[in-house]
Image: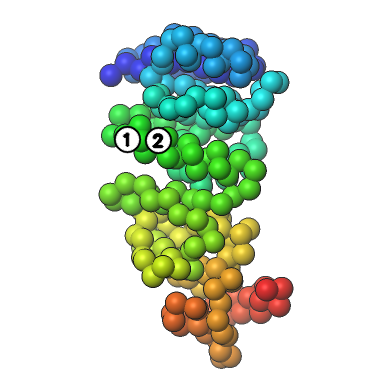
Amino acid sequence: MIYKTVIVDDEGKARTTLKNLLEVHCPSRINVIGEADCVERGLEIIQAMNPDLVFLDVQMPDGTGFDLLEQIPEIRFKVIFASAFDKFAIQAFKFSALDYLLKPVEAEKLIEAVSKLDESERFKELNKKLEVLLSNKNSFEKIALPTLDGIIFVKIKEIVRCESDNNYTGIFLKSGEKIMVSRTLKEYDDMLTPFNFFRIHKSHLINLGFLARYKKGEGGFVIMEDGAELEVSRRRKEEFLEAIQNI
């Protein structure tokens, strides 16, 4: 499939660079049919040209890429975000399981992102990802969990703990449900630690809000509200005890 593509970015140089990279590395996959330098113009071009794919900048003079998406009732195109390093935006992309590229765009990363476009994804699921992204644009409330069967969307405050299982992670919810996710525990450590989670062991990341009890020992053990008893590693003990003083 050749993707009819629109590039929305306020920087002319960035649009030209991206277009050139696409022409060199993805000529049989991408056909750039339009460009825009702001939210207003981007919306007009998308509505007029009905693209299959939009490369979307985050920060523009008249708003953000998020603002543009909010004005489209139902997304019928795939989206790849392109952003200068913006910690909040990158977290938002990770929490919603959406693809993004960091500027300046690297050819290898671009090729990888384009190669993933053919992966089957229903527009219903894409719209749900974007809904999570937009709901998190001011503060993080939901997270998209990629499983072998698709994407499951949960509230962060409903996660009790996360447990490593090689290259997978078991996510344990307040409801008692366990979700196996095709990502490593380290990825969830990076995402969730700012939201009252603590890595007590190489295999365990816990939500301190669900901590029921701490049992002393060499490293000690925690008992969670779901009944799980988990070891605290000796090297994390001191930092963990400091963290629970602030609960």
Asked if labels 2 and 1 touch by Cβ distance under 8 angstroms, the answer is yes
Q: Secondary structure at mark 2?
A: helix
Decide if residue 235 is in sight here.
no
Residue hosting label 2: 126
Q: Where is residue 87 shown, x and y percent of the image?
A: 64, 43
Residue located beneath label 1 in the image: 121
Q: Quadrant of residue 50?
A: top left
Specify the quadrant that holds the N terminus: top left
Query: What's the residue type where badge 1 is placed?
Result: Glu
Q: Nearer the viewer, residue 133 or 191?
A: 133
Q: Residue at x 50, y 43 (%)?
A: 132
108 in relation to 181, above or below: above
Viewed as shown, does residue 61 lie left or right of 235?
A: right
Q: In the rendered view of the protein, which quadrant contains the C terminus?
A: bottom right
Q: Secondary structure at mark 1?
A: loop
Disc 1 and disc 2: Cα gap in Å? 7 Å
Q: Is residue 63 above or below residue 166?
A: above
Image location of residue 157, percent across then percent down:
54, 61
